Amino acid sequence: MTRETQTTADAGGSEPCPGCGLVLPISDGPTHAYFGSSASCWALFGELLAREFNNPEYFAAHQLTVDTYAVQHPGVPERRTTQSVGLHLMTLCLVFEQGADPGDGPRLHKRMVNRPNFHWLEPPRLSGRMTVADVLPAGDAQEHSALVRVWARDVWDAWGVHHQVVRGWIDKSLV
Ligand SMILES: [Zn+2]
């Protein structure tokens, strides 16, 4: 009996996230309007965000958390996703190549949002990388920040084929 139940659960019970590839139980819960994530992955991201919103020490990593999740779940080509992926990649580029403080992210976004003429970047393979599930086990704020940074770096590296384009957008958008 137990084995049967197990088999049924395995057969119809899980799916890979279309963004990060994380295999999780199928859920009919809510997802983001245009991020390409499964409902279960979106729920894990919600847990991570709740932790950041409930604790100022965790919140220090917030901008990087959002940037990373967004570009690991690019969704399908349309105006909003094109702009979202472009903007969040620019922030990651500023952090990892120009030493920007992720805490300045919102301010940087305000300066950048209407400047570059974004076009859709064909997403690279984004699965097989770190995911939101690798950050959740962090035991304290310091570990959380460290894991978010490693995750962000991993996902930024995955977009390597488009780094040059992103650098070009930054050159054009920052005065
Ligand atoms: Zn995902």
Image: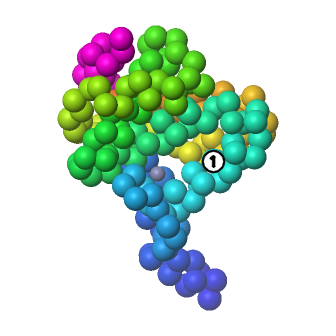
Q: Is residue 73 magenta?
A: no
Residue 133, placed above or below residue 140:
below
Quarter of the image for residue 111 reads: top left
Q: Is residue 103 left or right of residue 153?
A: right
Q: In this rendered view, identify the residue nearer to me: 46 or 1.
A: 46
State whether the magenta stretch is mostly helix, strand or loop.
Answer: helix
**Secondary structure under badge 1?**
helix
Residue 44 position within the rendered picture, expressed as x and y whole percent measured from the top left: 59, 55
Residue shown at 25% from the left, 46% from the top = 79
Q: Residues within 10 Å of mark 1 (few under 14, many from 20)?
A: some
Q: In this rendered view, identify the residue nearer to me: 9 or 104.
A: 104
Residue type, mark 1 in image: Leu
Residue 48 position within the rendered picture, expressed as x and y whole percent measured from the top left: 64, 48
Residue to which mark 1 is pinned:
49
Give the residues in magenta.
160-175
The C terminus sits in image quarter: top left
Q: Is residue 122 left or right of residue 154?
A: left
Please say whether residue 103 is visible from this viewpoint.
yes
Q: In this rendered view, identify the residue nearer to me: 153 or 116.
A: 116
Residue shown at 73% from the left, 31% from the top = 143
Residue shown at 43% from the left, 64% from the top = 15
Residue 56, placed above or below residue 101:
below
Q: Is residue 7 left or right of residue 77?
A: right
Residue 12, placed above or below residue 71:
below
Q: Is residue 170 left or right of residue 56?
A: left
The N terminus sits in image quarter: bottom right
Residue 126 position within the rendered picture, expressed as x and y whole percent measured from the top left: 38, 41
Residue shown at 57% from the left, 51% from the top = 45
Q: Is residue 166 magenta?
A: yes
